[in-house]
Amino acid sequence: MPEGHSVHRIARQFQTNFVGQICEASSPQGRFSDGAAVLTGRVMDECFAVGKHMFARFEGDFWLRVHLGIYGAWDFTGQVHSTLGQTGEYSRPTVEDSRGENSLTSIGAPRLARVRMAEQESESDVADQWPPEPVGAVRLRLLTATTCGDLRGPTACEVLEQSGVNKVLDRLGPDPLIVDYDDGERAFIEKVQRRATPIGQLLMDQSVVAGIGNIYRAEMLYRAGLDPYTPGKLVTTDTLREMWADWWKLLRIGVEVGQMMTIDGLEGEAYERALRHREDRHWVYGRAGEPCRTCGTPIMLAEMQNRKLYWCPSCQK
DNA sequence: GTTTTATGGGAAG
DNA sequence: TTCCCCTAAAACA
């Protein structure tokens, strides 16, 4: 699925174009007709992401929770803000992060466009019809006077009360864009070191740390020089501190750029190339059998938790 | 044209 | 641990 960075970008899209607006909700596909009937005609009061979950609160304290799963996506049409590939800063406006390094900034001029927000974002031509004809299996359409959001393929799309939202939040580990830095670090370290489970599994466990998926997992383990099979309790506190700082940094880069840029520090041509080609963005993900960029050893591939795990057996001990 | 694959996760066994 | 759900695009034939 879209990992944590995309969900934060989607929430930002809703903050910009939907919050404060009356939303018409519908389910062109029909599988969310009841939920849409509850939401339609209400103002969206707030929207935010925690890990890979997005929450939007509507007038009357009705919450919409969406989880995109492995291939869900939102398509936005009409007045849309996008900063794909651009740099800038972002933070959830109602939350100050502990480092004070972020500030809410303008995120680009509105324009008519169609933007797909999934793991990959892409833009296509301006729709010539308003509202646009639903394409494919649209589970939920949220429509304001100027912007249309179409949701397809989610793993979860439901209306909840506050208590239901709390229940979901309670089982999520720290998200660097939500929690205080030091509190999050402490929680992360404690949750990892309490268990004998391999660190490669723990990073994917949303109750340990929220928002990391299969790509960030592989890349963070590489960046930490850590063998994916190391039991959580044997990972040193120093290494876990570095990993929390790294996730804090990678998530912000991902939200700014709209891509999982896990080889950071690229400039100029190399950066442009990395934006266009996934294989140029990562150290190990998707590179089974290819030489490690650092030592030349062929990248290994194994299954962990039904997912493909990539690592360099030489650089990661 | 058909099969495979994907950046998840929950329930069942 | 295995199965199952959701959808579209890429990969195969």
Image: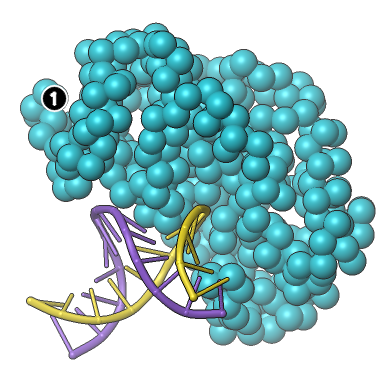
Chain colours: A cyan, B yellow, C purple
- Looking at the picture, how far across and down is residue A224, in whole percent? 78, 61
Horizontal side of A130 relative to A14 (left or right) equals left
Work out which quarter of the rendered image holds the C terminus of chain A and state it: bottom right
- Looking at the picture, how far across and down is residue A133, in whole percent? 10, 34
Q: Nearer the viewer, residue A87 or A167?
A: A167
Q: Is residue A92 above or below residue A177?
A: above
Q: Nearer the viewer, residue A234 or A35?
A: A35
Q: Nearer the viewer, residue A50 or A130?
A: A50
Q: Disc 1 marks which amino acid?
A: Pro
- Looking at the picture, how far across and down is residue A70, in whole percent? 42, 56
- Looking at the picture, how far across and down is residue A7, in whole percent? 49, 38
The chain that hosts pointer 1 is: A
Inspect this view and state whether residue A313 appears: yes
Horizontal side of A131 relative to A296 (left or right) equals left
Residue at (79% x, 25% y) in the render: A98
Horizontal side of A232 relative to A220 (left or right) equals right
Residue at (91% x, 59% y) in the render: A236
Residue to which mark 1 is pinned? A131
Q: Residues within 10 Å of mark 1 (few under 14, many from 20)?
A: some
Number of labels in the image equals 1
Q: Is residue B6 above or below residue A259?
A: below
Inspect this view and state whether residue A290 appears: no
